[in-house]
Each structure stands twice: as C-alpha cells, then as structure tokens.
Image: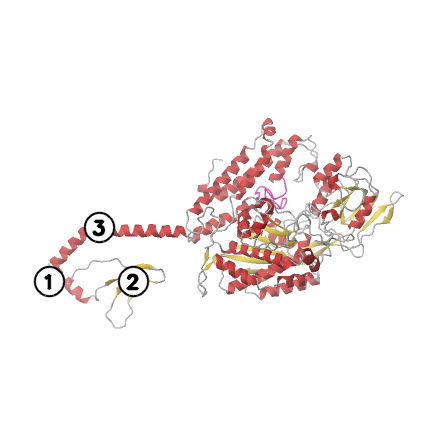
Amino acid sequence: MDRLWGLLQRTQRLSPRPSQTIYKRVERTQQWRLEEEEEDGEEGAEPAVHFCPMELRGPDLGSRTGGQSLGLLAATGRRAAPYLVLTALLIFTGAFLLGYVAFRGSCQACGDDVLVVSEDMNYEPGPDSHQGTLYWSDLQAMFLRLLGEGRLEDIIRQTSLRKRMSGSAGMAALAQDIREALSSQKLDHVWMDTHYVGLQFPDPAHPNTLHWIGAAAGTLGEPLPLEDHDVYCPYSATGNATGELVYAHYGRPEDLQDLRARGVEPAGRLLLVRLGEISFAQKVASAQDFGAQGVLIYPDPADFSQDPHKLGLSSHRAVYGHVHLGTGDPYTPGFPSFNQTQFPPVQSSGLPNIPAQPISADIASLLLRKLQGPVAPQMWQGRLLGSPYHLGPGPGLHLRVNNHRVSTPISNIFGCIEGRSEPDHYVVIGAQRDAWGPGAAKSAVGTAILLELVRTFSSMVSNGFQPRRSLLFISWDGGDFGSVGSTEWLEGYLSVLHLKAVVYVSLDNAVLGDDKFNAKTSPLLISLIENILKQVDSPNRSGQTLYEQVVFNNHSWDAEVIRPLPMDSSAYSFTAFAGVPAVEFSFTEDGQAYPFLHTKDDTYENLHRVLRGRLPAVAQAVAQLAGQLLIRLSHDHLLPLDFGRYGDVVLRHIGSLNEFSGDLKARGLTLQWVYSARGDYIRAAEKLRKEIYSSEESDERLMRMYNVRIMRVEFYFLSQYVSPADSPFRHIFLGRGDHTLGALLDHVRLLRSDGSGDPGASPSQVTPGLGFQESRFRRQLALLTWTLQGAANALSGDVWNIDNNF
C-alpha cells in the first residue's frame, strides 16, 4: 500500500498543472458552452480549448490524512451523483422543450397550409457575402427597386422594329445581340443550342391562289385576289382542293355537327370559317374529320371591338397561323432535330391532309354574298354583310397551295444563375423571340420582359442574393411555327428535364390588353399564383392589387382567372409532353381579342394605342408577377406547389362520369377502380402534408427529399403505358389520345348516342363509325386508373410506405 501511495505522489509531481473547468460564452451561437482549458504554465501560451466532462477534485494534501479525506469526499460524491445527474437531466429537458417551442413558432412551413411560406422566410447569404440575413420582404423590395431601373418600353419598341422570321439573317443578328446581352450580366453560364428543323414557307415564284370554278367542267374561272401572298398557313397540305363553299362558323366539331344537322353536308366541300375560339390547327383537323376538301380562314369584324374609338383590323388584312395539330418539328415527331440525329421516315400525325389558306375580310365578304341555302343561326351571324349570312352551299371554288418545306437552323439562347443548395433543380422562364411580322405583342413584349428579368436578377446576385435553385432564362426560336424551339429542346433533354425542371414560366402573349388578367396553368401553381397576385399592384386600378381587381366582379377568383393550358401555348409541351408544371400569364381586353395578333399590323404603335398608353405599366406588372414567382420558386426551402390540388381535379372529372354510372352498371361495368385510385391519391397527399408539417425545415436532406417528391407530381400524370413516339402528349388530363380522361368521357357519352360514333361528338379521337365498345372502355379505364394509382404510389414515397390494398 505504501509503495502504491508513493507511486501516486510521484505521478502528481510529474503531471502538468491541474485542469480548470471554465464556463465560457460563445458569441456566435448565443449559447453557453462548457469548455475545458488546459494551462501549461507558460507565459502567453495559447490555451487548447476542448470539451470534457465536469470532474470533482479534492485538495492535494500529500499525506495519509489527505488520503482519508479524499476517500470521504469520494463517498460523498457517490451519494450526490444521482442528484447531480437528475438535476442535469431536468435542466437539459427544460432547455430542449423551450428551444423546440421557440423554433416551432418561427417555422415557415407550419401554417394552416404548409405550402404557404410566411413573410419571414429568410435567405442566408454565402460565406463570401457581406450582407446580413435577407428575408422575403427584403428580396421583394430589392427586386422591385432594381426592376424599376429598367427600360422595358424601349426594348419592346426596338425589338418590334427588327425583322426576325425564323431562319432569316435578321433573326441571326438578333440572336447574337441577345447572347451578348446575357453574357454582359452576372450569369454563371450562357450558351446557344441549334436545331435543324423543317419549316414551311410560301413559294414566291408560285404563290397560293384561289379561283372560282368555270362554267365549263374542269376549268378555272375568275381569280379571287389574295392581297398579301406572304400570309399563309405553315404545314398546310400542298396541292389542289376543289368543291362548293359552305359557311361553318368557327369550324369547331360542334359547329360542323350543327351544320350537318341542318341539312348542309361539309364532306367534299370547302369550308369558310371564322378566326377565333379554337386554333387554326384545330379548325383544319375538325374539317378533315368531317370530310371537307379544304379550309379558308378569315377574321370577322364581329369578333373584335365594335367601339368606333378603338383600333380595328383593316378589312384587307389576313391573319397568319400554322395548322400542325401538335408542337415541335412535325417531320421528326418525338425526336430532337439535332443535325447529327438519324430520323425515322415518319411525320407527325398532327399534319393535315387538306390544304388551308388565310383570307381577308374583304375576300370573305365576296364569298358570303354567293352563298345560298338555309340562313345561318343567329349566333353564327357576323358583321360583313348588310343581310344575314347563309350556310350554303355556294359556287365551286378551287384552292391551290404551293408552300414548300425548308430545312432551317434555329437557335435557342440560354442564361443560368446556379442555385446555392439545389443547383440541379431548375426554375425555367422563357419567351419566344421570332415573329412572322413586327410581332410587338406576340414576342417583343415577352423578349423585353425576359431581358429585364435577367438584368434584375443579375443585379440581385451582385447585392447578395443567391437562389437555392438554379434560374434558367431562355429565348426561344421557331415559336410561330408551333413552339418548335422549345419542343425540340424538351425532346433532346427529356431524360434530364423531367427530373430537374421544377416549373416553366412563359412570357409569350403576355400583354394583349389591360382589362382582364388570366393565367393558363397547371393546378399545382394555382395557390402560389393567388398568393403572388395579392402582392402585385394592378396596372389600371390605382390602390388595388391584381387579386382585388380580378375578384371585383367574381368572388371566385380562380373561375375568373385560371384556364387550362391550350395546345397553342408554348407552355403546353412542358406539361403535356415533359410533365413539368407550367404557366402562361396574359392581360387581355374585356370580351374582345387583340385584333392585330399574327398580322403585319402587330406594331409597337398599334399595341401602344390599343392599351391607351398603358403598355409600360402593364408590361411592368407582368414582370413583377413573373419575377416574384421566380423568387418564391427558387428561394423557398419547401417548393410552394400545391400537390393536393389534383385530387380536386380528379373529383371534378369523376363528377362528369357519374352521370353515366347507371348506363355502365346496366352493362356490368363500373368506375369503382377510378374512385379508389383517386382516394389513394388524396390520402397520399394528406400523408405527405402531415409529414412536412411535423418535420424541421433546417433539415436540408429531408427538405430535398420532400422537394423531389413534390416537383415530380406533374410527371406522375404522364401515362407510362403509351409510347411517347405514338402519343407524345401523355398527360391524362391535358394530353391527346385514348389514355386521357377526356377520351374516356367522350367514349362513355356514346352510351346515350345512336351508336353512329359521330366524329363531331369527340375531339379526343373516338373511332368514327363505331359506337360504345366495351373492350375499348376497359382498356381506357385501365390506362387511366393505373396512371392515377401510380401517381398516388409515387407521392407516398418509399415502397414500404405504400398502401397496397387497392
């Protein structure tokens, strides 16, 4: 024992000076930390700081008496240890609960709706930034201040003065100028993407013609002058069309069915149809389905403003419009038009087989005067004649279309600001750059807003803003031919974009008036749009926000504002083809269309006059709306996409099907599987909502997992059971084909028809000549049900979390 005690004394003499336990406040975290500082006794030496447990030390007495005292203290310490541990545990538990309550009170994702981010949502700058914390209100104020320093009106004017038809020298010069403008900003990447596409142009040596049929069989009579041979329908079938003329209103399927019901057969004839309601391509496709030989499209004054103080379209102006029922290069459907790609020898099924030609109101007036037959319904009457319109038929006409296809290089221009936390997730905004004519409203406004947003966000980056997700700014080419540039880019990078693109925002057709506002959009974005509308001032009602403007006459704001994405929107392909939620904003005139769109009169001066000098204010409002949308989508920790909204969409469509449940039951059929899949989706959405609500926003890994599930919801609604080459628009709500809910509804309606399978009853490809088919119904139901069930399963997360009691 004496030997052991001596050894302990010698060890103490050789050891450094005793450790001192110090409570030290660390300013950065504002928390008390327990640190142990080892002192080596040397003057000015830097103490080494590290964490250690607290230890009880007795006095160093250096004798047996001291050893006894040490033993007594040790025994006392053993008795006190449980109380010390209990006290420490209580202190720790109280501190933890206090901190948790404080954190939950400031959590941005914990309101009544987890998708609405509070005004306190903050942004912490990177380590190189000298800025303090930036909150949403700071970013909003910074954005509005920097945007206000721009020159939107000048850019619109200058762009509209430049000739920029796709494939022209003017377009090549403009593309280079825009690339240089992007390169001059604080962007991380700027590049150009070139595609070689098939575009159709008129043949100057052999212009399109329209003749009366001569008295002698097979001869041409007097020509009808087409005032402007530059106006044509790209992708019209070429060749001759001969037949009697029939007036068919807007050329919708229901119009042609009504025409047939009134004893006027459209098959074998040329149809005269008015501009509006549906696209050129849909008019020609409907005419073809009903057996027409060709289509003439004219602008009727009744479809534009009757106010004598407002500008109107000249009666000798025809309107340009492509007739491909689809998007992208119709000669490489489903494949990207890169120069090195080996294309299969196929064409888009959306190319028409009959010729089409735009004509002016003056020519249409001459044709309408020759029509006989029944008087057109009152709703079909226009304002070209002093007497009522007749349905026809009228004298024979001969239409000759000589358009020719040209392989044309088109260029998309890209600029990117890389995200800080999720750089592989892209928030995309784009605008069409090309125009057939001056294109002030068609593309100059969108191009100007795009360039101003690039400048503004670049300046924000210089002022300390770093988005969590990447911002991708794109100037598209080939838009006037059916969103060719954007669709080819999607086709080329589809395998990447459906995983990485969060949202697409289109700036096309943004300012066509100033009376009304609408948003063509995916349901996922409706809640976010509502939130942003409440923060943007109305451009024409002082003291009101845009939200207050739109609810002034209709308290159901979404019924007033929200529209589905049409095929002629550049945003359509992003959603219906690639499964990326998209939106296109538009200010329009109340009840009347902008008269100069797609004409040579779409100039800056005319647009300025139509808006009564309010063009800069309206364009600024669109820029504010789009910019604040970009900030939220690129900045919020949790993506503000309302994934539960699609449950309401399914319910609304199922409501239409419920009408036929009795007819189906009589045949031993049921819609129960669709109801079950819809229920699974709603339960999966609610479960994800609860998971997000109970999670911590500071957990970056968890937030990213949630964001990945949320951003792919739109993609889940692309049917995995049809080929993209055969059915490129696979979206079950927006797409085209037998897999869509619209096609199923059209098919079920045949249960109450006469079984003739009338094509006019079905814009969704119901097979002509056949009535309701049980085998086809079962296949349609399976395609729809399992796509919807797949969306529910994917939203549920991991496979072990999926409820498989379907």
Tell me where residue 63 appears, x and y as whole percent. Answer: 10, 62
**Residue denoted by label 2:** 24
Q: In the image shown, does 582 or 413 lie closer to the viewer? A: 582
Q: In whole angstroms, how far apart are the C-alphas of marks 3 and 2? A: 24 Å
Q: Is residue 770 or residue 114 the one in the foreground?
A: 114
Q: Nearer the viewer, mark 3 or mark 1?
A: 3
* Residue under pointer 3: 83
| Principal secondary structure, stretch drawn in magenta | loop
Q: Residue at x 51, y 60 (%)?
A: 141
* Upstream in sequence: badge 2 or badge 1: 2
Disc 1 is placed on an element classified as loop
> Mark 3 touching mark 2, by CB under 8 A?
no
> Where residue 339 sits: x, y (%)?
65, 57
| Mark 1 crowdedness (10 Å alpha carbons): few <14, some 14-19, many ≥20 | few
Q: Give the residues in magenta.
A: 718-739
- CA separation, marks 3 and 1? 31 Å
* Mark nearer the N terminus (3 vs 1): 1
Q: Residue furthest top?
A: 666
Residue 63, label in figure? 1
The foreground one among 170 and 205 is 170
Q: Secondary structure at mark 2?
A: strand
Three-letter residue code for mark 1: Ser
Q: Give the structural element (helix, strand or loop) at label 3.
A: helix
Q: Residue at x 36, y 62 (%)?
A: 28
